Image (cartoon, grey):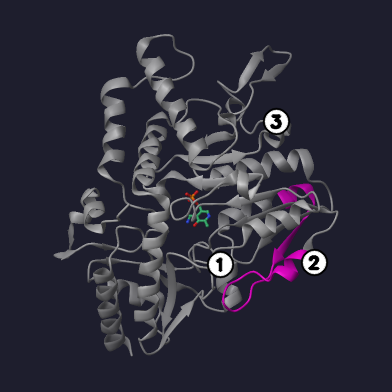
């Protein structure tokens, strides 16, 4: 299928906006992506025509809403090639998915002196929940080192694994460096010690094909809003066998089988982990987002974004004083950089005046910033609606920053 960026851009109403009288150039896609009209309309259609609570109603609207909500589960299952629909649990996003696993897994499997392995390049949401449960269970957090390019050092990872390791939790793609981690190899190695692996897929689900059965990961977490869907909806995939063994996360409606004052028995997965009224409208929005990605073709997206990344990297490297953080051989969609000793916020503010949205700061990865001994970076992160002309505009804006600050 031919990929036509002009056609794609026409589907995203926000991109038609002018910012400071200049066309919006949106390069903050790692923080959140823009939404195509089909996603926006699916949410408003839900509220206009079938709004009602799901699972426990016998009336017409409730049945329609339940069907759409459950169809989202099915399309999500197919999107990541999960074996069963029941392995797809809806959450608020990656952060909640990781917290759910950290808490329930710790209760069941993590004890005093056990170890949890994460990596140097994790987002805070794949650090802090583990730190919290380690403190509670008196367990230890172990960190996989990286090299200067921002790649994990595999031999060092291997050395961390032992009989005390209870879980490995690692990001698929770094939101700061763009590194695509060799997760299949990591999973294989961890499994050879019978250690389950959680993958933080917040940055990968919109950019590359994910096949959880092929990867054989035990848990995979991602957010709707980073893949052209709404905020407030995310996914936790877990292998049925482990999810069945975990205790519920929250108590309430829908997650129960039978409640008496003496004892409560719980529903089966996925509902065991979906207590209370769910974010029905945004789940339906997520369905539209996945349909949009499927229609565009995830491999087309990957190839086009790779072309954009390579073009941008080439152009940025030509800028004197430019330092790019994250030069892994296998990377995608993100360029983090500093220009001379210009503070990231100063650069970001000038770039903004060109109508260009970039992110500045620590990107919720303070330990990674500490590792590089920098307070933060400027980050341009790409999506398939970005163009080479937009990269040229960014380069011109950076030249302007240099004139002002150097
Ligand atoms: N992990 C990574 C790698 C991320 O980039 C992000 C979002 N920046 C998260 C986790 C958290 O995602 P959310 O805020 O949608 O829960």
Q: What element carries label 1?
A: helix
- Give the Cα distance between marks 1 and 3: 35 Å
* Disc 3: which residue: 244
Q: Which residue is drawn at 49% across and 66% down?
A: 178
- How dense is the environment of label 2, judged by Cα within 10 Å: few (below 14), some, or many (20 and up)? few
Residue 352 position within the rendered picture, expressed as x and y whole percent measured from the top left: 27, 69
**SS under mark 2:** helix
* Residue 366 marker: 1
Nearer the viewer's eye, disc 2 or disc 1? 2
Which residue does the image show at 38% across and 80% down from the upper left?
314
Left or right of 221? Residue 377 is: left
Residue in the foreground of this view, choosing between 116 and 262? 116
Secondary structure at numbered mark 3: helix
Tell me which residue sits at (51%, 76%) in the image.
Answer: 327
As drawn, is 389 to the left or to the right of 368?
A: left
Reading the image, the residue beneath label 2 is 159
Mark 3 to mark 2: distance in Å? 31 Å
Question: Which residue is most to the left?
Answer: 21
Among the two numbered marks 1 and 3 on one chain, the one whose residue lies closer to the N terminus: 3
């Amino acid at each position: 299928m031919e990929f036509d960026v002009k056609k794609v851009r026409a589907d995203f109403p926000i991109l038609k906006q002018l910012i400071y009288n200049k066309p919006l150039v949106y390069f903050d896609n790692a923080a959140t992506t823009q939404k195509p009209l089909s996603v926006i309309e699916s949410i408003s259609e839900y509220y206009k025509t079938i709004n009602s609570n799901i699972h426990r109603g016998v009336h017409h609207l409730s049945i329609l809403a339940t069907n759409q909500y459950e169809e989202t589960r099915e399309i999500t299952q197919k999107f990541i090639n999960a074996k069963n629909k029941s392995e797809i649990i809806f959450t608020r996003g990656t952060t909640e998915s990781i917290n759910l696993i950290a808490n329930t897994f710790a209760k069941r499997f993590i004890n005093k002196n056990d170890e949890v392995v994460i990596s140097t390049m994790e987002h805070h949401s794949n650090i802090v929940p583990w730190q919290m449960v380690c403190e509670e269970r008196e367990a230890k957090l172990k960190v996989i080192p990286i090299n200067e390019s921002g790649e994990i050092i595999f031999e060092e990872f291997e050395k961390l694994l032992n009989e005390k390791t209870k879980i490995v939790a690692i990001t698929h793609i770094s939101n700061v460096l763009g590194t695509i981690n060799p997760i299949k190899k990591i999973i294989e190695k961890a499994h050879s010690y019978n250690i389950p692996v959680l993958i933080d897929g917040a940055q990968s689900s919109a950019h590359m094909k994910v096949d959880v059965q092929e990867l054989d990961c035990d848990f995979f977490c991602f957010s709707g809003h980073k893949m052209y869907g709404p905020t407030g909806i995310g996914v936790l995939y877990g292998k049925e066998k482990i999810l069945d063994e975990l205790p519920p996360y929250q108590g309430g409606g829908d997650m129960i089988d039978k409640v008496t004052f003496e004892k409560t028995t719980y529903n089966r997965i996925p509902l065991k982990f979906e207590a209370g009224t769910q974010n029905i409208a945004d789940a339906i929005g997520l369905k539209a987002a996945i349909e949009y990605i499927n229609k565009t073709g995830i491999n087309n997206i990957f190839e086009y974004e790779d072309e954009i990344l390579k073009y941008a990297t080439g152009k940025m490297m030509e800028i004197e004083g430019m330092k790019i953080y994250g030069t892994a051989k296998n990377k995608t969609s993100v360029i983090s950089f500093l220009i001379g000793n210009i503070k990231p916020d100063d650069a970001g503010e000038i770039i903004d005046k060109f109508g260009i949205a970039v992110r500045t700061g620590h990107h919720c990865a303070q330990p990674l910033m500490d590792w590089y001994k920098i307070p933060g970076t400027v980050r341009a992160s790409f999506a398939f609606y970005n163009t080479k002309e937009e990269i040229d505009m960014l380069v011109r804006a950076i030249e302007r920053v240099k004139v002002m600050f150097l």
